[in-house]
């Protein structure tokens, strides 16, 4: 993420999905976690 020093207003899920598509395993895992939290399934398991 070049440019701003902070991440305010950034779409973290889109960034992680893009990283995952490029083969970044950490980006993939973070995207999975974000999706679980947004769907409510993180707290039910």
Image (cartoon, rainbow, N blue to C red):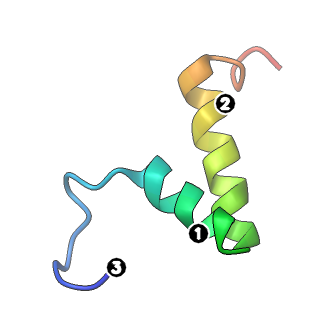
User: In the image, 23: left or right of 8?
Assistant: right
How many C-alpha atoms fall within 10 Å of the one at disc 3: few (<14), some, or many (≥20)?
Answer: few
**Quick one: label 1 or label 3, which is nearer the N terminus?**
3
Number of the label disc, if any, that sits on residue 1:
3
Q: What residue appears at the point 42 percent right and 53 percent down from the top-left corner?
A: 12
Q: What residue appears at the point 66 percent right and 64 percent down from the top-left corner?
A: 20
User: In the image, 31: left or right of 14?
Assistant: right
Residue 36: quadrant of the picture:
top right
**Quick one: label 1 or label 2, which is nearer the N terminus?**
1
How many C-alpha atoms fall within 10 Å of the one at disc 1: few (<14), some, or many (≥20)?
Answer: some
Residue at label 2? 36
Mark 3 or mark 2, whichever is nearer to me: 3
Label 1 to label 2, Cα distance in Å?
Answer: 18 Å
Q: Residue furthest left?
A: 4
How many C-alpha atoms fall within 10 Å of the one at disc 2: few (<14), some, or many (≥20)?
Answer: some
Q: What residue appears at the point 19 percent right and 79 percent down from the top-left corner?
A: 5
Q: Nearer the viewer, residue 28 or 42?
A: 28
Residue at label 1? 19
């Amino acid at each position: 993420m070049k440019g701003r020093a902070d991440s305010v207003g950034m779409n973290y899920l889109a960034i992680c999905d893009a990283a995952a598509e490029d083969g970044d395993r950490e980006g993939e895992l973070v995207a999975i976690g974000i999706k679980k939290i947004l769907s409510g399934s993180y707290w039910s398991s």
